[in-house]
Amino acid sequence: MKKLTAVVSVALLCTAALSAQSSLGTIAGLVRDSAKAPVADAMITVTKKDGSAIRTTISNSSGLYTFADVPPGEYSAVAQSPGLPDITVPSLKVTAGQATRADLTSTAAPAVMTSAAPTSILSAPAAPKSEATLASLGLPPVGSLKPKTDIAKLDLPPMPSAAPAQAASSTAAPQATAAAPAAPATPPVDNDTPFAYADFTWMNAVPRNHDSVLDGKYFSPEVRVDTNYIYDYNHPIDHTLGGTTEGERTGEVVLQQLNVGGDFHWDHMQMRFLTQLGATATAVPRNDASPSVGQWQLADAYRYLTEGYAGYHMNVQHGLNFQAGIFMSFIGLYSYYSFDNWGYQPSYVSSNTPWFFNGFRMQWFPTNKLKLEPWLINGWQSYAKFNGKPGVGGQILWRPTGNLDFVWNTYALGQDTIATHRTRLHEDDSMEWKYYEDPNKLMHRMAFSLTFDIGCETGGGTQVVAGEAPGAKVNCTSNSKTAYAQNFIGAMFYNRWWFDHDKFGVTLGGGFMANPGRYLVLLPPINGTTATSGSPYFTQNPGQKFSGYDYQATFDWMPSQFVTWRIEFTQRGTNVPYFTGPGGITPPGGNNGNPAMYACMDGTPSASAGGCGNDGGLWSPDLRKQERRWTFALMVHL
Amino acid sequence: MIRFSIFLLPVIALVAADEPTWNKPLPEWNVEDAKAVLTGSPWVKVVTVAYMRKLSESERRDGGNMEAEGASKGVGIEGLDNFSLFGSGKSKNPGKATPATKLWIRWESALPVRAAELRGADNAAPTIDGEDYAICVYNLPLTVTGFDMKVLPESLKRVGWLKLDDGKEVKPSRVLVRPDGSGIATLVYFFPRSANITSDIKRVEFVAQVGRAYLSQFFYPEEMKFQNKLAL
């Protein structure tokens, strides 16, 4: 025993010397039974009294144990060994740079050992690892070796023959290979990246690309080309379509959109831009009257960009972004880029509502299935601010399963009419449901999208701009003696079928809108009319009712994930003449530069309908209540 | 009685033969017993890592982070080989094939595992503080996961859990990452013992996502007994 004590003393001296300059201490001692004999293989656990640390080791054949590098503080110690009752030292003080001796001696006679382990051991809480160096015991340390070497050296059971083959596949599930029963592991799922836990490329308004051909480390390019040929049964003489943002000309091949750009990304920085070349570069900005407020021709400055924003990403929960600039609006569900959509011509609910916003937004992903996105924006699809108040709004996007999508868009506060203070409110809600899928069938998937919109304007009736007449007073509900009803209700429904492993798609659907004040009616481009100029031929005053319906039948051939060939039949109808008829909507000789005035047959502008007596008479656009057309489109998205 | 015994003896022998060598008092363990625990017991599994598919640009944009772990790092212009207006409808995945990686998952807080590490072999096993269930993932090559070390512990905590067969999910209270400096890391997932996993629970699934690597492994409490008592 003296010899053992000497060993402990030497150990203490050595450890004390080693730790003299340390901020840590050492505990060492002997474990002995009641006969003072050393107890080997006893498990010693020391626990810091504030609960911040627990460490465990095993006594050696001489009953010696040591704990090195122990944080200073008050500890308790317990030794456990089969056949012996627990030996406890209730209080030990560890001092930095010093060794503390704690001998653990049993006061009871050893019990007869049985095969059952002491309950106190089995029920012990999670405990730490050995302090001892165990490499000498014959096994290599697991964590310090390369994986293949580890597995080989430790004689792990051979992998089942099926496992490696599955492992080579990116979709293979891991297989258990230890002695436990073979366990069916679940397929790999990305539970971190928002909306990546399932494949949502089936959705309307989501591109179906799975691969990123040109993707790079710092820049992910994107190229889109959308071309069409529209055959209109009205055969307008000026090849002009009106009342839509998804087609501008008829009987011609049209470059609808050419978008080149992409995303810069590095560290937490974000930047995205996408150009807008082609027919939409004029067809969409002309619906925004806000640049006429003030100077600098913002429509010219911005028209060739569909998206352009800077952003900053933060790793908060599943992601938090702050972005400012021009970004896409998904009010009305459909994407601005037809390649992403199930059809080419969406219903009014989409075509007449915003495609973009200019402002600031935050994207917050509290879970991988939910996005909360508040906006502070200049206005309703506007480059600038119409009046004194900006628009506020936001989107809630929730995809609870891989088959279901809900999106709620809300807009409020904005005063989005020139020269009057009418406040706009709008709610746009959509859901999409993939209700059937069987990859082994020819017709292997079915899904639908449903969108419902309701909105209104309220206020007005006061003069805003000196010299100009105050706009009419409006309210959200119904006509009254002092105010017109100014509201909007609309919906659209589309169902899509996929065939032959996504090579073919068929979509059927349509929608309607009712708008007693025409504030969400796209102005036909009569004589070059824009939202700023207005037109005497199609006014948009409160009290002027507009309602419309439409339906589409679409067939897609998708030979690769990057290409869509599309044929679509569209029929649209309205309660007032609206669509371009055979006579067209362009005055003889072309636009006369005064779209806000009447046009005479010789091109002369006239302030009144009766002012063309000496100019060949009054010219009138040919507007019809119905439009039927075929659209042939070729779209590419890389 | 004799006849009965004659018939019973082989059964007893079989049962005895099935008894794991390590299911005996700790002082009787030798290195081979410890090795058996660390390589072939119900607390230790070897899994083949499954890799999640690369995310497309649109998916990453929808997810709000073009730098997401699933980012394709690009294939350059050769990716255009896939492109054809009259194409086959199939595309070569630009993501490189990822080598199969096998690694260990241990129910680290279980007494037999701790004892085996102490007795047998493994001074590289992490120190465990507190009274949680602890599950360790060993030998994870950092190169194949592509994760950002700065945000790793928090993201690991977010996408790891135990799923009990009654549908209950237990999230880790914390996750430790121990890189060894040579491109290999050990991950320790701590789960609160308040989850109270008992022998009545037939199956516990450990799920973890590390970058693009995905682990899913079942444990069976009924088998995770040491000297007839559940050891987790």
Image (cartoon, helix red, strand yellow):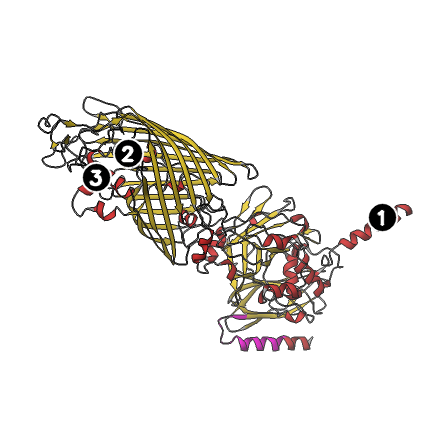
Q: Chain of mark 3?
A: A
Query: Closer to the camera, A351 or A84?
Result: A351
Please provide percent x and percent y for residue A312.
Answer: 34, 54
**Residue flagged by tag 3: what amino acid is it?**
Ala
Mark 3 — residue? A289
Mark 2 — residue? A241
Label 1: state its secondary structure. helix
Q: Residue furthest top?
A: A481
Q: Is residue A283 above or below residue A107?
A: above
**Residue flagged by tag 2: what amino acid is it?**
Leu
Give the foreground label among 1 and 3.
Answer: 3
Label 3: state its secondary structure. loop
Q: Is residue A13 magenta?
A: yes
Q: Chain of mark 1?
A: B
The verdict on a common chain for dots 2 and 3 is: yes
Q: Specify few, some or many for label 1: CA neighbours under 10 Å numbering under 14, 14-19, or 20 or more.
A: few
Q: Is residue A186 above or below residue B25?
A: above
Q: CA distance from mark 2 to mark 1?
A: 93 Å
Please provide percent x and percent y for residue B136.
Answer: 57, 58
Quarter assignment of residue A421: top left
Residue B130 is left or right of residue A63, and the answer is: left
Please provide percent x and percent y for residue A354.
Answer: 30, 38
Query: Closer to the camera, A351 or A152?
Result: A351
Label 2–label 1 contact, CB within 8 A: no
